[in-house]
Image: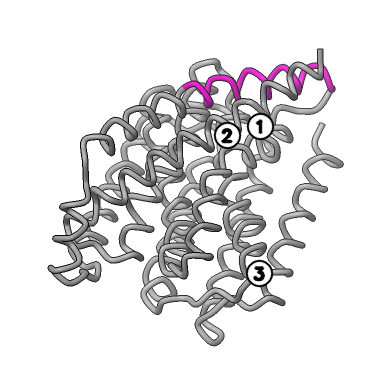
Amino acid sequence: MIIFDVALIAFSALILWKGALWVVDSASILARKFRLSEMTIGLTIVALGTSLPEFLVTATAAFKDMGDISLSNIIGSNIFNLGIILGLLALIKPIPAHRTLVHRDGPILFLLGLFVLIMLYDLNMGRGAGLTLVIFFVAYNLLVFFRGARIPKELAAADAKSAQKKDYLKLAAGFILLALGGQFMVEGASSLAVRAGISEWAIGVSIVAAGTSLPELITCLAALFRDKKEMLLGNLIGSDIFNFAGVLGLTCILAPISFSQAALPGMFTFLFMVAIVIFFMRTGFRITRLEGAVLICISLFRWGLDYSILP
């Protein structure tokens, strides 16, 4: 029944959200032992934690030979991060943009997206492309870790003392919930696509992408109201980089994927979105409420095309 499929998707989104919160909370405490700044944590540890649902859903779909859901989840999540989530947060409160994000991480994300577009032009991505993406992901994280800002030793020492055994247990429990949520999300989405007569691509780029992006949304809302805005924007850009370089790269190594022509318009939309975000960040080094509204409109327009044009 369609109702059961929708309920399964809702349940999977719930446990994905809960699991991601546990992963992010515990990983953030442990990461600060190494004196990482909020922006560095957002670009790396928090981005990795909140992107685990994308990896589990994408890999699961790839092993089930559902290439469209596998890739559309990544593209849809990345657009959702920079469109709906960033736009919504900017409507609530303008978001400052660190110069490093404008001059380094934003352009890196754009070039990474351009590379992915070139690699998927023949509608297949194999182990060679996957290995290249993973190597890039490792190099990028080394760059961020060794060139990132550090917090004072006194604050790092206080955080190190606050780390307890329960943080390790929460981290493990979070991974388990993410694994279960990823499995349920793919099952519910694929079944819904068949029953409702909607393409796998449209379901993956919207419902599945929104569900797996819930951890980013919740994390960014918490960061916004706790006045940790550097972690907020770093998390969104870092998650997009991790989705393409880490998630897609590892997935292609484990199970090369094939997909439909629908992937190409989605990638062009993503590159356009990244260019707009970089431009907005550069103008005054912040995302204003008006710019946030523009980002939301672009995402909603893209969703409309996915459901009206795709077979």
Tell me the colour scheme of the image.
Answer: one colour
In the rendered structure, are the residues bearing label 1 and label 3 in contact, judged by CB atoms less than 8 Å apart?
no
Residue topped by disc 3: 92
Quarter of the figure that contains the N terminus: top right
Disc on res. 251: none
Q: Residue 55 sits in which quadrant?
A: top left
Location of mark 1 (residue) = 260
Q: Along the line of sight, which residue is nearer the eye, 289 or 21?
A: 21
Please name whichever residue, 39 or 59, is drawn nearer the observer in this view of the structure: 39
Q: Is residue 106 above or below residue 122?
A: below
Give the magenta part as a residue range: 180-196
How packed mark 1 is, by other alpha carbons closer than 10 Å (few <14, some 14-19, many 20 or more), is some
The residue lying at 84 percent from left, 22 percent from top is 196
Q: Disc number at residue 123?
A: 2
Helix, strand or loop under label 3:
helix
- Few, some or many C-alpha atoms within 10 Å of disc 3 (few <14, some 14-19, many ≥20)? some
Against 256, residue 79 (above or below) is: below
* Amino acid under disc 1: Ser
The C terminus sits in image quarter = top right
Element assignment for label 1: loop
Q: Residue 62, relative to residue 237: is it above or below? A: above
In the image: residue 93, left or right of residue 27: right
- The nearer-to-camera label among 1 and 3 is 3
Estimate the spatial distance between the alpha carbons at disc 1 and disc 2, rounded to whole Å.
6 Å
Which badge, 1 or 3, comes first in the chain's sequence? 3
Residue at position x 64%, y 42% in the image:
210
Q: Residue furthest bottom?
A: 284
Marks 1 and 2 close (CB-CB < 8 Å): yes
Q: Position of residue 198 (x, y in %)?
A: 81, 27
